[in-house]
Image (cartoon, grey):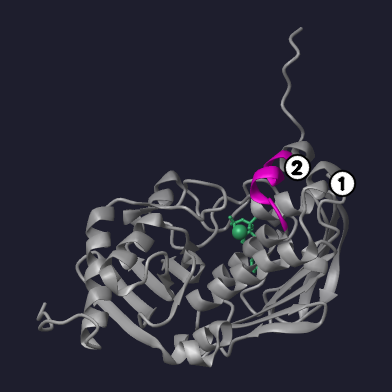
Amino acid sequence: MGNIRVLDDQLANQIAAGEVVERPSSVVKELVENAIDAGSTAIDIAIEEGGLTLIRVTDNGSGIDPDDIETAFQRHATSKISSASDLFRIASLGFRGEALPSIAAVSRLTAVSSPETTGLGRRLAIEGGAVTANEPANCPQGTDMTVKDLFYNTPARLKYMKSIQTELGHISDYVNRIALAHPGIAFTLTHNGNSLLRTLGTGDRLQVIAAVYGSSAAKSMLSVEAENADFELRGFISKPELTRANRNGMTTIVNGRYIRSYALNQAIVQAYHTLLPINRFPLVVLEVGMHPSLLDVNVHPSKMEVRFSKEAELKELVEKAVREALRSERYIPGPESVS
Ligand code: ADP
Ligand code: MG
């Protein structure tokens, strides 16, 4: 008899959680992305103690069918893709079907959801991956996910959590950026009952920039817009007078997903050329739209890094668009190009 066996689901989910759920901000990210994928126009995020005791995300999206609610927490269960070819044209933020089972494996989670305005929904409670309740519930259309006591059953991971302030910093940073990425969604973020962010969901990105960075920063932004056959760019860059000591004020968004891209940041900074003091960086919110087939988001479970199949062309367009914005305000001399 050999001694190799297939792990049971609960253990497999806990192991996957190690990758998907690094810290409280990862839970916020996964729950908020699900809310966005569900077409929500309002998303409320309530945090307590840096997310270690409570993370609650409430949305007004499509909700989960009562018959599906338990399935949603199964490993690799997703409504977003169904075939291998879908992987090459991912339009949703999620698709791996890993987030909910992973989060539920390392916390005490309650999901309340209804796809109907009739208020007839379902409440599912899971503790450390085991379902403890699945019952009818009255709730408005949408989904309410409450995650308590994150990592309560994985003491090794819990030990690695930093201070409440540090964990909150990661959460707040993520929520700010996703709000910048989705000006059409009204976001609220509260910590221990104190409001940290409120956006109106009017679609006005400058309003979100004002909410995140302050109204004087919003007044110092220049609009960027460009497109070619493959890419559509729009967003805002700061005038060269407004800079920061690091790249944290640079937010790049690709197909609605906030991503980290050294390549895009580099193209932006290069466009400013000598206008930026040494080791200073602009404030940027730049959204790039492209056909999903030009993008590989399946690089890492957090989907924060992506691969562009036409990276050089994209960098060129970004650099040109940023330079154009600076030129239109006479920061860069020379005639405006007619292209
Ligand atoms: P993925 O997002 O990769 O599909 P998840 O584990 O995050 O996987 O979610 C599993 C499924 O549960 C989703 O595909 C979706 O059908 C459903 N779901 C999760 N959260 C929500 C939500 N807030 N509103 C509606 N449906 C949701
Ligand atoms: Mg998801």
Q: Are marks 1 and 2 in contact (CB under 8 Å)?
A: yes
Dominant secondary structure, magenta: helix
Residue occupying image coordinates x 78% and y 79%: 139
Residue nearer the viewer, 52 or 186:
52
Was residue 16 drawn as part of the magenta stretch in this picture?
yes
Residue occupying image coordinates x 70% and y 55%: 100
Residue occupying image coordinates x 47% and y 65%: 247
Residue 60 disc label:
none
Question: Magenta span covers which residues?
Answer: 15-23
* Residue 37 in sight from this viewpoint: yes
Was residue 73 drawn as part of the magenta stretch in this picture?
no
Image region (quadrant) for ligand 1: bottom right
Residue nearer the viewer, 244 or 230:
244
Q: What element carries label 1?
A: loop
The residue labelled by disc 1 is 153
Vertical side of 294 occupied by 192: above or below: below
Judge from the rendering whether residue 114 lies leftward or rightward of residue 239; answer left or right. Answer: right
The extreme right residue here reads 132
Quarter holding the N terminus is top right
Of the residues shown, which amino acid type is indicated by label 2? Gln
| Res 68 → quadrant | bottom right
Judge from the rendering whether residue 37 lies leftward or rightward of residue 197; answer left or right. Answer: left
Residue occupying image coordinates x 34% and y 77%: 234
Q: What element carries label 2?
A: helix
Residue 14 disc label:
2
